[in-house]
């Protein structure tokens, strides 16, 4: 497969949402994945938000991010028709390279179990599997 990987543009938004739906990726269309939220993210770290195009369509995404201490792999998705051809591997590699260029030395991903394809992918790419960490989170809405 000959996919072209490039930074996401805001004009890609609808196609990206359609891909996530085809891929069965869960996302937050009214919060951090809304058009306005993505627009802000593109302004601050658009070079880490990548799409893959093949046959005139967006067939893959990965949104890298970092807080200056650690890099993250977010919103990794590949169109079902383009899977098992190394595209997720390529997308992750591109984000890893971009993070390394910014001086980051660690990159992490949260995988919602059970997601065997994704778990197998990160294992194959030599990510260390930590089962001793429990993820805490809090929504900071209604705090203006
Ligand atoms: C997970 C996902 C992104 C993988 O995309 P992909 O392009 O098919 O992955 P790759 O072709 O780069 O796979 C690389 C390796 O990962 C592992 N892998 C990928 N999919 C797998 C599957 N379904 N079963 C077992 N191993 C799998 C394999 O080791 C594979 O290497 P191989 O094909 O040489 O055996 C894709 O299945 C997807 O979009 N899933 C739905 C959305 C999702 O779960 N995203 C991740 C959220 S954390």
Image (spheres, rainbow, N blue to C red):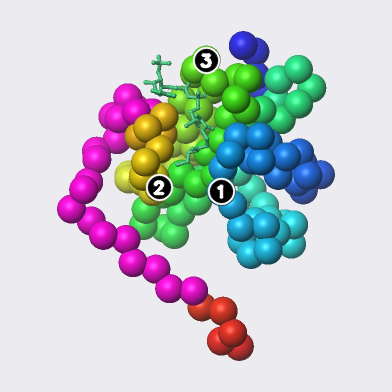
Q: Is residue 6 above or below residue 83?
A: below
Q: Which residue sits furthest left?
A: 132
Earlier-in-chain disc, 1 versus 3 = 1
Disc 1 packing (10 Å; few <14; some 14–19; many ≥20): few
Residue identifier under label 2: 112
Residue identifier under label 3: 85
Residue in the image at 70% along x and 25% along y: 53
Label 3 within 8 A of ligand 1 by Cβ: yes
Q: Nearer the viewer, mark 3 or mark 2?
A: 2
**Prevailing secondary structure class for the magenta stretch in the rendered image:** loop
Part of the protein shown in magenta: 120-139
* Helix, strand or loop under label 2: loop
Q: Nearer the viewer, mark 1 or mark 3?
A: 1
Disc 2 packing (10 Å; few <14; some 14–19; many ≥20): few
Residue in the image at 58% along x and 39% along y: 24
Residue identifier under label 1: 26
Earlier-in-chain disc, 3 versus 2 = 3
- Locate the N terminus and report the quarter of the image it occupies: top right
* Helix, strand or loop under label 3: loop
In the shown orientation, is residue 27 left or right of residue 94? right
The x, y position of residue 30, in whole percent, is 68, 63
């Amino acid at each position: 497969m000959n996919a072209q990987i490039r930074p996401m543009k805001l004009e890609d938004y609808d196609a990206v949402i359609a891909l996530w739906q085809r891929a069965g990726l869960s996302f937050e269309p009214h919060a951090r994945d809304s058009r306005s939220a993505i627009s802000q993210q593109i302004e601050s770290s658009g070079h880490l938000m990548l799409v893959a195009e093949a046959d005139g369509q967006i067939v893959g995404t990965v949104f890298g991010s970092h807080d200056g201490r650690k890099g993250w792999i977010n919103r990794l998705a590949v169109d079902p028709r383009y899977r098992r051809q190394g595209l997720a591997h390529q997308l992750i590699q591109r984000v890893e390279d971009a993070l390394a260029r910014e001086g980051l030395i660690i990159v992490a991903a949260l995988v919602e179990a059970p997601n065997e394809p994704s778990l197998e992918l990160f294992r194959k790419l030599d990510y260390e599997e930590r089962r001793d960490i429990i993820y805490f989170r809090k929504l900071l809405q209604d705090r203006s």
